Amino acid sequence: MIKSEKSAQPLLAVFICLIFLSSCGDSSKETKTPKSEDRQKTEIPAAAPPPPEPEAGVKPEPEPAVQPESEAKEEIEPAPEPEADVKPEPEVVAKSVPEPEPAPEPKSSDKPEPEVKPVVKAVPVKLPGTAAVTITNPANGSMVASPVLVCMGVQGIEVEPAKKGVNQGKGHHHILVDTAIPEDLSKPIGKDATHIHMGDGSTCKALTLSAGTHVVRTLFAKGNHVPYDPPLTATVVVNVK
């Protein structure tokens, strides 16, 4: 029995060695596989090709500057709305004053405008105190029948027709019926039913008067019908039947 055990020990050792070798071979296969996978995983990617060098004489275009988002947001922010109490000031718009256009020159074919002569206001002429006019007919306060003949006389002046113009100390008569002497003696005497002109140089005039009391005046004036100042006048009151 002791010999059979001793002879069996080498066989057992060989069997154990075979088992060990077979187990080692399987483990080496298993360990080799993950190494190849790790190599694939840890392989370094190929570097990107360098950018092409610029040709001689050609300047590279500058890359556009990228504005930071913070700055872009600040520019886009709208202006704050004005408060309700604060009113915006109105804009002052300067108005341009147009330059005056030069007056057009008159053409040779245009007719010249007629010259406007200034109106000369008549100046009343004063006579010496000896000048006077009188009403010789009818008498003051008399009872008369229509038509009434009114005649006038002068002293220190001369009666002449109005067509001879304005001459110092000369003129013609005017009869005023039931009307006052004009206040403005620098204007010509009017001509109507109550202002009767005797520009022909006559000294008598027949008047058709209605029944009743009438005031008859005479007013002496120059050839332009402007009275003297002070006025040369006389007055009578008559009663018409």
Image (cartoon, grey):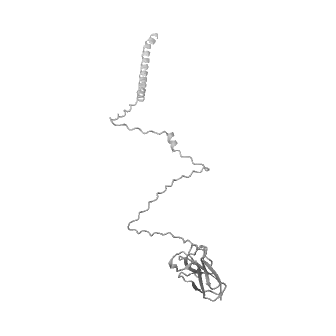
Left or right of residue 133, residue 97 in this image: left
Above or below: residue 207 compared with residue 228: below
Image quadrant in which you'd find residue 51: top left
Left or right of residue 160, residue 241 in this image: right
Image quadrant in which you'd find residue 220: bottom right
Above or below: residue 40 compared with residue 97: above
Q: Quadrant of the C terminus?
A: bottom right
The extreme right residue here reads 141
Tell me if residue 153 can be seen.
Answer: yes
Q: Looking at this view, is 182 or 3 the one in front?
A: 182
Residue 56 x %, y %? 32, 35
Q: Looking at this view, is 31 or 206 the one in front?
A: 206
The extreme left residue here reads 56
Above or below: residue 90 compared with residue 136: above
Residue 43 x %, y %? 40, 29
Tell me if residue 213 can be seen.
Answer: no
Residue 215 x %, y %? 64, 82
Q: Looking at this view, is 3 or 192 the one in front?
A: 192
Residue 98 x %, y %? 47, 57
Residue visible at 43% across and 21% down in the picture: 24
Q: Looking at this view, is 200 or 6 the one in front?
A: 200
Q: Total marks drawn?
A: 0
